[in-house]
Amino acid sequence: MISLTGVLGQLFAIALALLLAPLLTGWVNQCRAWLQNRAAPPLLQPYYTLHKLFHKDVVLAHNASALFRFAPFIIFGCMVLACAIIPSLSTDLPFAPAADALALVGVFGLARVFIALAGMDVGTSFGTLGGRREMLIGFLAEPALLMVIFTMAMIAQSTSVATIVETLAHRELVIYPSIAFAGIAFTMVSFAENARVPVDNPATHLELTMIHEAMILEYSGRHLALLEWAASLKLYAYSCLGLALFFPWGIAERDNFLALIAALPVLLVKLVIGGALVALLETINAKMRIFRAPEFLGTAFLLAVLGLLVRLLLESRV
Amino acid sequence: MSQAVPLYAQLINLLAAVILLLGFAMLAQRRVIQLIDLFALQGFALFLSTLVVAVKTGQHHLFYSAGLTLVLKVILLPWILHRLVRKLHIKGEVEGLINIPTTTLIGLGLVIIAFNVATPISQLSSTITRGTLGIALATVMLAFLMMITRKKAITQVVGFLAMENGLFLAATSATYGMPMVVELGIALDVLVGMVILGVFFFQIRDQFDSLDIHHMEQLKE
Amino acid sequence: MSLLPIDSLILAASLWLAIGLGGLFAPRNRRYVSRILFPLGAIVGLAVGFVGLVSLGSPVETATLAIGLPTLPFHLRLDNLAAVFVLLLGFAAAGISTYAAGYFRQGEGMTPGVLNLEYHLFLASMLMVLLADDAYAFMVAWETMALSSFFLVTTDHRHEEIRRAGYLYLLVAHVGAIAILLSFGVMTGGAGDYTFAGMRAQHLSPFWGSVAFLLALFGFGAKAGLLPVHVWLPEAHPAAPSPVSALMSGVMLKTAIYGLLRVSLDLVGTTLWWWGVVALAAGLLTALFGVLYATVQSDMKRLLAYSSIENIGLLVVGIGLTLLFHSYEMEALAALSLTAVLYHCLAHAGFKSLLFLCTGSVLHATSQRSLGKLGGLIGPMPWVAWLALGGVIAGAGLPPLSGFVSEWLLLQAFLFSPGLPHSWLNMIVPAAAAAVALTAALAGFALVKFYGIIFLGQMREPALKDAHDAGPFEKTGLLWLAGLTLALGMLPGTLILRLDAATRQLLGKGLAERVVETGWWLLAPISPERASYAPVLFLLTIVATLLFGRWIVRTLYHGRVRRGPAWDCGYHFQGPRAQDTAEGFSQPIRRIFGPMFRMTRHFPSIRDRQPIYTVKVEDHFWYWLYLPIARVAGAVSSLITRLQGGRIAVYLMYSFVTLILLLLVARP
């Protein structure tokens, strides 16, 4: 079953994720700056930041526990695992059986629990506040994400991400209305999960409405670098998952080396467009009050369930 | 299984789903202006789906009713409503009797009921897009729910109009259209009803200085 | 000499009894009781667990014990379903008893010897419940279990609230027991044969079958904490000493699940589809209710108790799904969801016992149960803190630990529900999965709150600095349970291979072929293309990334660390009180789900010299259901007191009227 191309493709996918993720963040930031009439930071700024942070000493609070020091590595590991499972270039991933789409939600959940706990570890007011809010967003976003996955899984008769993508990419062009619902819900969830504008703002610091930043306030040096990198990886993973589920064309199949080579430019183009869209959506939306977030995510949840129902009504019986 | 479904049916299904989605969006919308815009959008989706049915079946009267939908529901009625909102100085957010998440949850329950109730009826229909019957019914129910849960008279009117959208969808998708006379009659009814309601609004406002239907409870003797 | 598994289990029950009685020789000698008797009990527990494990898949065994009435002996039977729960009981008891050996201290409630007797009686009676093969033996064991646990709950009977909690528990337990007894009565079908074999032989009409099922659901639900008979649970669990809470939550609640499975899938014989719907609805409500209340608690043991209610809800959801599939003869899917139920029973026994025991250690170290007075305990109590983290991850249903496996299996079963041949169910049941997902996510919230507030952050009270870590016995017990949690998370394939025997016995189908096909490391209940999960690979990746990342960062850059005061955006003057309290952490939940709670809040005014904000969250059910019942009961009994005139003439008249009425009615 496990082929050499598969293993190579797998390793390549992971390496690519590690390399591309900060670039994607940089690209989104650049687009955002352009759209907001600001001077844009260089595209490679996230790499510079990571490099700088890795060089710096870690300054730990006196009462920071070992959990605080381990958490960035665990979160980073979770995101690498997520990137390894999600097909970005090829569906031939020997790693994919380790976790299907439901387990993927679990991976994100695990990372979330650790980042929230790490936020609470030092015992500052901002940290606990961030942890609480992160868990709030989490418990609202997770069911919505699961329902999106349920809809897709029912179409493909499988919860394995690779199988879903293969099914969707290699069928005739059929319009599934349920996918439209799932797509919108997924977009909303991924904005919330990646601390993007309507829910959180990645560019702010020291604002009373911050979530992600509040949790990582006490981090510095290599720990902060890993967390930033993990955040980029998360954005990359969600982007790839969205692209794979809703625009699956161009992803290579098993044992197809040529397609694998062709898949890279396709992926890049998709990411460039997707990143620009993220920046656009962030710019045209206003950051909402934290207590609007449940409504926002509730809507996402509703859409996902609606997609499921539409799937059951319209598509299973015709 | 799905591969056998022709493109036009897929398009109609998609548009029906969009109409349902807009129905939910209207249910969850807080602002009056956006509510009217959503209604216009729903009308547009309805217009498109009627057009698809018309092109497919080649029936003339369907083209007419598509045109009627476009003129009436996408342009005329939203325009009247916008004017009303401006004239009456209706501002701010739509007040609801029940909060919005609860309303949408009830809406979800209604969709399940509608889908299941419609299933036996749609078995009778011979058209391939009979699945949309459930969606049409759900749209009607959601509009009904909106009328029940909102306080402002204008949102109730929008709910009433959205209900009509649902009925129209049912007619076109399940039976490829009603007879022209019926359609014209309904269209005219809606228009006249709208005008009368518009007049009423002014009366209500003069009487109570508000458009909150809550005040009308005082009218009982 | 070869000892049959069932005989060895009877032996184990008697050993537990003997150990219990052994404490009476020196009831006040704490060292003797805790250092000798409890470890002995743990060894017996371990043996029981292994017997359960071995007898999974072996043929059914029966035995008859000549106890009780001459014509009515105890019938005992060890089949695969019972074996699963025997396994659960044994392994959980091994960990909890080891812990208990180090836990009970001098001067806490009753004398050690008596406590020891009740504890081991409790264990033995639970074992007998699982082995019982007739209604008589079952009820005797069931009542013994209820009574012994009642005495254990009221160990510290000097407190008024603990006595109240115990009384409530006893009351609900007996209402439930009556329902169970009635259910057995219905299932005999009037034949008067109270053995389970006799009940299986009866063919009940759908009506009487439904009556039996509903009575069983109510009766066992009262023991398990199903809505609306859950009220005793959040009172009794915090009142009991921690090992007892662990035993009750981890094991005793599962005996109720066992009873429900036994009745609905084995004894009744028929299955109607709407039973599944009833169970599904009751389970979903219970799960959502439990988890919402868990998130807003500020007492650590109450939080866990509500979380147990949630888990029971999920188990009943799984049972409902099993019954649904079973009623439509979709046995393979029924087997899938039943596997999820059994797996979750085991997983919950592991992680919930672990968490309860951790609260015990915290309680001993700090004498605080209120979350608002804890914090930062990962410093002085690293063992307890790190082991509790395992319990939290498993309890939140996150990979790669045990809770995730069962949740995953349950969701997989839900994914097949659109195939149900019923036009309403195939739409509603998949949507119900959304509620399950919400429950799981909220459980994460509740447990992050639990862990973060107890173990992380700054210490909220200065006295916490003197907290000490758990002793060697306690550590061993915790380690054992944490190890079980890890093993259940890592080796789902191996265990499902064993559970297959139980599902095969009840439903005729199992998941064994698939597991054998795909290998122990990969869990793929249907096919690897359809769904798969490989926890070992999963954990390895994360650990490998962790180590590799650490190594590479240290090689390329450096590993320097400096310590300094917390930055906190420059607000240095913030002390430990600036952290979120338990109430603060759950404020979003109270706000979003406001109508679900009965809240009384007190806001400070600007003139208060010592402003205090308090919020009290109560259960609606008290006011909607229990207090009205209590009021009606009070009114009825005050009516009855009127009959008691106190005059002899009136009493004579009662007898006389009764006599006349009887003469009139009872004419031949």
Image (cartoon, rainbow, N blue to C red):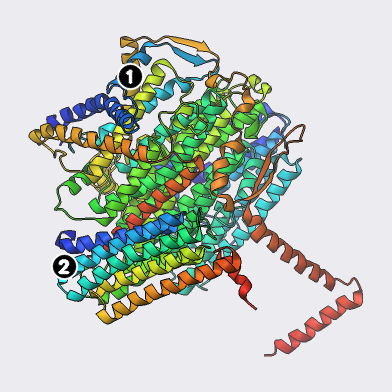
- Residue C607 is marked as none
The residue positioned 19% from the left and 32% from the top of the image is A268
In the image, what residue type sits under mark 2? Val
Residue C343 at least partly seen: no
Residue C450 at x, y percent in the picture: 55, 35
Residue A140 at least partly seen: yes
Q: Residues within 10 Å of mark 2 (few under 14, many from 20)?
A: some
In the image, taking residue C416 as reference, residue C32 lies left or right, namely: right
Residue at the farthest left position:
A258
Dot 2: chain letter: B
The residue positioned 59% from the left and 32% from the top of the image is C580
* Location of the N terminus of chain B (image quadrant): bottom left
In the image, taking residue C661 as reference, residue C353 lies left or right, namely: left
For mark 2, give the secondary structure: helix
Quarter of the image where one finds residue A220: top left
In the image, what residue type sits under mark 1? Gly
Identify residue for label 2.
B55
* Location of the C terminus of chain B (image quadrant): bottom right
Quarter of the image where one finds residue C53: top left
Residue C336 at x, y percent in the picture: 34, 52
| C184 over C459 or under it: above or below | below
Residue C556 vs residue C410, the one in the foreground? C556
Dot 1: chain letter: C
Residue B136 at x, y percent in the picture: 33, 68
Q: CA distance from mark 2 to mark 1?
A: 61 Å
Residue A168 at x, y percent in the picture: 19, 48
In the image, taking residue C486 as reference, residue C574 lies left or right, namely: right
Identify residue for label 1.
C549
| C102 over A142 or under it: above or below | above
